[in-house]
Image (spheres, rainbow, N blue to C red):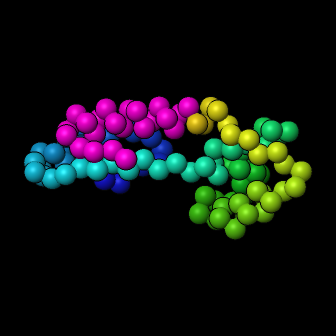
């Protein structure tokens, strides 16, 4: 099951419709984390997406720029607790929804 990076809005509706249409299907939700988007520069508080936005880059253009951002010798990259907690919360919500239709989450 592939779903949005932006959250779980309407996932319940999608899962219920899929379960009705495919009653014998096995549903698997794989929760992916993007560690490079969950760090910040301790000195400035900037997240990689902040730097990306200042440079006018789109998400799909970030891969090459990310190497440059993360190679900044002056930056002190640390985990951003707020984003980590949010990612864990989303996984817990998804787990509840997937379990409600007999699916699996990884």
Q: Could you say which quadrant of the image residue 7 lies in?
A: top left
Q: Residue at x 89, y 51 (%)?
A: 74
Hey, which residue is sitting farthest front in the picture?
106
Q: Nearer the viewer, residue 15 or 27?
A: 27
Q: Could you say which quadrant of the image residue 59 lies in?
A: bottom right
Task: Tell me, yes or no, if residue 12 can be seen here.
Answer: no
Q: Residue at x 82, y 45 (%)?
A: 76
Taking the magenta stretch, the answer to whether it contains residue 19 is no
The magenta segment is 85-106
- How many discs appear? 0
Q: Residue at x 77, y 57 (%)?
A: 69
Is residue 43 positioned above or below 60 on the image? above
Residue 4 left/right relative to 43: left
Q: Residue at x 78, y 63 (%)?
A: 68
**Main structural element of the magenta stretch: helix, strand or loop?**
helix
Taking the magenta stretch, the answer to whether it contains residue 92 is yes
Q: Nearer the viewer, residue 16 or 43?
A: 43
Residue 14 left/right relative to 23: right
Hey, which residue is sitting farthest right in the picture?
74
Give the percent coordinates (x, y) of residue 36.
64, 52
Give the percent coordinates (x, y) of residue 21.
12, 50
Residue 89 left/right relative to 96: right
Task: Tell me, yes or no, if residue 71 can be seen here.
Answer: yes
Give the percent coordinates (x, y) of residue 88.
49, 35
Give the percent coordinates (x, y) of residue 57.
69, 60
Q: Nearer the viewer, residue 56 or 25?
A: 25
Is residue 29 positioned above or below 45 on the image? below
Q: Nearer the viewer, residue 53 or 19?
A: 19
Q: Could you say which quadrant of the image residue 94 lies in?
A: top left
């Amino acid at each position: 099951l592939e779903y949005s990076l932006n959250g779980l809005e309407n996932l319940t509706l999608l899962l219920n419709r899929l379960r009705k249409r495919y009653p014998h299907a096995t549903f698997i939700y794989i929760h992916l984390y993007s560690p490079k988007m969950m760090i910040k520069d301790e000195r400035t508080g900037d997240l990689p997406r902040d730097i990306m936005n200042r440079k006018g880059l789109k998400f799909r253009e970030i891969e090459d720029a990310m190497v440059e951002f993360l190679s900044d010798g002056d930056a002190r990259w640390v985990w951003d607790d707020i984003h980590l907690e949010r990612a864990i919360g989303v996984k817990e919500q998804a787990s509840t929804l997937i379990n409600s239709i007999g699916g699996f989450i990884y």
